[in-house]
Amino acid sequence: MTLVIGALTIGLILSLLSMGVWISFRVLRYCDITVDGSITLGASVVAILLVKGWSPWTATLVATLAGAAAGLVTGILHTRFKIQELLAGILVMTALYSVNLRVMGRSNVPLLDVETLASPMARLITRCSSNSDTLGVCGWQVPVQDAAMLVTVLLVTVAVALVIRWFLLTHIGTALRATGDNPQMVRAQGVNHRTMVVFGLASANGLVGMSGALLAQYQGFADVQMGIGMMVWGLASIIIGEALAGRTTPGLALCGAIMGTILFRLLVAIALRWGLNPNDLKMVTALFVFAALVLPDSVKSAMHRFFKRQHHA
Amino acid sequence: MLDLRQIRKTFFPDTPNEVQALCGIDLLIPEGTFAAIIGTNGSGKSTLLNAVAGAFELDQGGIHIDGREITTWPEYRRAGLIGRVFQNPFAGTAADMTIAENIALAMRRGCRRGFGLALHRTARAEIAERVRTLNLGLENRLDNPIGTLSGGQRQALTLLMATWRRPRLLLLDEHTAALDPKSAAQVAELTLTLIRQEKLTALMVTHSMQQAVQLPERIIMMHKGRVVRQYEGQEKDRVRAPDLLAAFDQVRRREQLDPAVAALLAKQYG
């Protein structure tokens, strides 16, 4: 049960990251590697603010804005200074490593005995469960802290997904979606596509920053290395999500991103439980994304060749 | 009204690949006039349209629409005054978005885009009503991705989108060239209907001499970045496709002559 709750909580937290990656990768069709730095930025900003005694909500909001600022810089480097999209992301990601060290003052900030977003929920659950430290769920005893974090991130993730879905159906949201689809058409319809790219990347990285802030609060520390490979993680989740829910409408695609992240996290948790070396996790994730990107076309062309040969024979 | 004053554009200047695409073009298209631009490949027809649309900065000259100078306006700002239909039927629409969403984008052309829902009930009803006028049966497929439609259907929708909010100028860049003959004829007919109905000022690039003769009220012939001849009024009504082809040949022959001799011949024989 602990494995499931842990996987669900991390899955929900990282689904914010996946929604961010979905905005940049699928909506804007922009390969934004800033994500690897902005998730750590969100975590380090929230960690340092919580240690200083800020309210968890304010700290999370500031972390989200910090992530958005990172995306803003990438967008400006690409649109204003004509730097290639991948290079713009790499530049910002590299700079963020130093920024994160500066923010935290060291490579790791522990969050022991600080008020987090889940604390009010934990107090509420404790009060409802007669001041017990554990909560009975389907016959299993779950620590109140874990249950509180799960409920909090569930509420935050659902609220954020609903806001994004609503936004993508507005006039500006429709223009944002069209920007990735056909920039020439968007300009002909009077939309400044550069502003849209900058705005989209800022929103995407804001979500990633928020994900980092929640992750730091859940795992109880922020670490300067925690962002490595997160972009690929987001991609893997999106690919699984698209297989589950499709991507015909923004709502389905967002549901897919959330479900894909949770499922991927569960699969990872199970694989680790079965003895997968944690050091191999990033390589396995990268191989999965590679296979998911390449295999469908390879299988399709192999099938095509096979049937063509059969037809001629 | 479109007023072009001495517009010039050279691509790749001071390099071996230098191309003088527009060589000081002066052109006045009065309000409500439908003009066609014809010319050989590389004559500067599409470049002229792109210059008006703001796809690149001019080296020199000014562009005015209805008395407003738009020379320094970026492309997206000019879209508030200009409707465009591209040669490629896939260029004017966002393939993964639905028909209704594409049109919803066009409904706000030139307006501030806010946080209101793009497809509220009133907008949907209006879209269905206007799409029905195309007689393509698309009013029942508004929630289908526009990428699933044929080139002709997409071009008809692009035309509808370009004219949804009455543009001060409509630019048509060989918009029937990539379509099959039947679709091309339908789109050409729709073009004429919309232009006449809304009394639009329009500039159409075409390689089809038949279209140039039949559709517009004025023909502008371009060659090597210059306007070499214009047909309007009774002269336009009299001109036929073979006459235009003969005029092209004449321009080419004159080009091969010594400039002084060509000028003398032009003076003598027009």
Image (cartoon, rainbow, N blue to C red):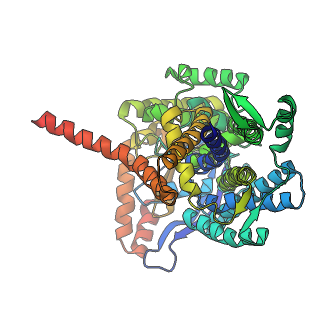
Image quarter of residue A173:
top right
Residue at 42% from the left image edge and 46% from the top image edge: A292
The correct choice, above or below, for A26 with respect to A70 in the image is above
Image quarter of residue A305:
top left
Q: Where is residue A295 drawn, in percent x and y?
A: 36, 46
The correct choice, above or below, for B44 with respect to B94 in the image is below
The correct choice, above or below, for B126 with respect to B156 in the image is above
Image quarter of residue B117:
top right
Residue at 35% from the left image edge and 71% from the top image edge: B257
Q: Where is residue A32 drawn, in percent x and y?
A: 59, 58
**Residue B73 in the figure: left or right of residue A86:** right
Which image quadrant: the C terminus of chain A? Answer: top left
Q: Considering depth in this image, is B183 or A108 the residue closer to the camera?
A: A108
Q: Where is residue B220 drawn, in percent x and y?
A: 51, 51
Q: Residue furthest left?
A: A313
Residue at 67% from the left image edge and 51% from the top image edge: A204
Q: Considering depth in this image, is B199 or A227 the residue closer to the camera?
A: A227
Q: Considering depth in this image, is B121 or A61 the residue closer to the camera?
A: A61
The correct choice, above or below, for A165 with respect to B43 in the image is above
Which image quadrant: the N terminus of chain A? Answer: top right
Q: Where is residue B48 drawn, in percent x and y?
A: 55, 57
Res B218 seen here: no
Res A234 seen here: yes
